[in-house]
């Protein structure tokens, strides 16, 4: 018996990267002034990576590493906005459209409140959404753990997918 596809699906994404010297800090596709950037194979944009994983999870397509492995030179230093655009194509090819995104960046420094509006607009544009369908928030880890010590940055995201009509 064939299983019916739900009209609405949800996915959760999480990503984390260490801070490192000699890298630009990219969050939500926006360059944020900082002495340290995030280490990773691509540009290490934890916010976009978490959103990609949320979208892939909602479509039951696995995770970011499955589709864009860090062992491939193709993705070395690639802008994560390109990964997000590719994930959007994967999701739409399965008959879905993005309903909304809600994401949180967790870091002690730098403060990013002045940049979240630009992040929101960039994410919306890449996913073909209006900005009111995207939420980007920031919080600290109250100086606890590796994020609280300023060693790295984490992000969480939830995405909803709607069946295209």
Image (cartoon, grey):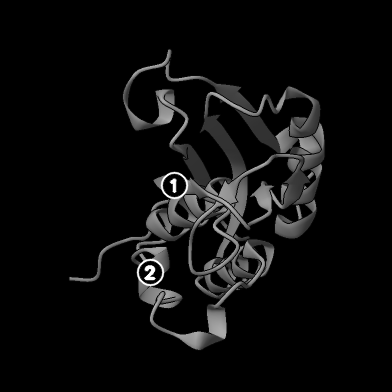
Q: Is residue 2 visible?
A: yes
Q: Nearer the viewer, mark 1 or mark 2?
A: 1
Q: Secondary structure at mark 1?
A: strand
- Name the quadrant containing residue 77: bottom right
Q: What crowding class fits label 1: few (fewer than 14 Cα within 10 Å), some (14-19), or many (20 or more)?
A: some
Residue occupying image coordinates x 34% and y 18%: 144
Looking at the image, residue 88 sits to the left or right of residue 11; the answer is right
Q: Is label 2 in a helix, a strand or a loop?
A: helix
Residue 152 is left or right of residue 84, and the answer is left
What mark, if any, has residue 18 been given in the picture? 1
Query: Is 85 placed above or below 113 here?
Result: below
Read off the residue under disc 2: 65
Compared to residue 100, the image places residue 117 above or below, namely above
Q: Residue furthest bottom?
A: 73
Q: Callout 2: 10 Å neighbours few (<14), some, many (20+)?
A: few
Q: Position of residue 137 (x, y in %)?
A: 62, 26
Q: Nearer the viewer, residue 64 or 133?
A: 64
Q: Residue at x 70, y 56 (%)?
A: 127
- Please indicate, yes or no, whether residue 11 appears anywhere in the rendered image: no
């Amino acid at each position: 018996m064939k299983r019916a596809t739900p009209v609405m699906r949800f996915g959760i994404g999480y990503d984390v990267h260490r801070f490192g010297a000699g890298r630009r800090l990219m969050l939500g596709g926006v360059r944020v002034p900082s002495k340290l950037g995030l280490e990773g194979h691509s540009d290490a944009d934890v916010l976009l990576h978490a959103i990609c994983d949320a979208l892939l999870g909602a479509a039951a397509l696995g995770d970011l590493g499955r589709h864009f492995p860090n062992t491939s030179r193709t993705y070395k230093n690639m802008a994560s906005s390109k990964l997000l655009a590719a994930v959007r194509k994967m999701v739409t090819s399965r008959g879905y459209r993005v309903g909304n995104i809600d994401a949180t960046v967790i870091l002690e420094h730098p403060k990013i409140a002045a940049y979240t509006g630009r992040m929101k607009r960039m994410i919306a544009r890449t996913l073909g959404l209006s900005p009111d369908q995207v939420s980007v928030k920031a919080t600290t880890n109250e100086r606890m753990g590796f994020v609280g010590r300023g060693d790295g940055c984490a992000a969480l995201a939830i995405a909803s997918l709607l069946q295209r009509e």
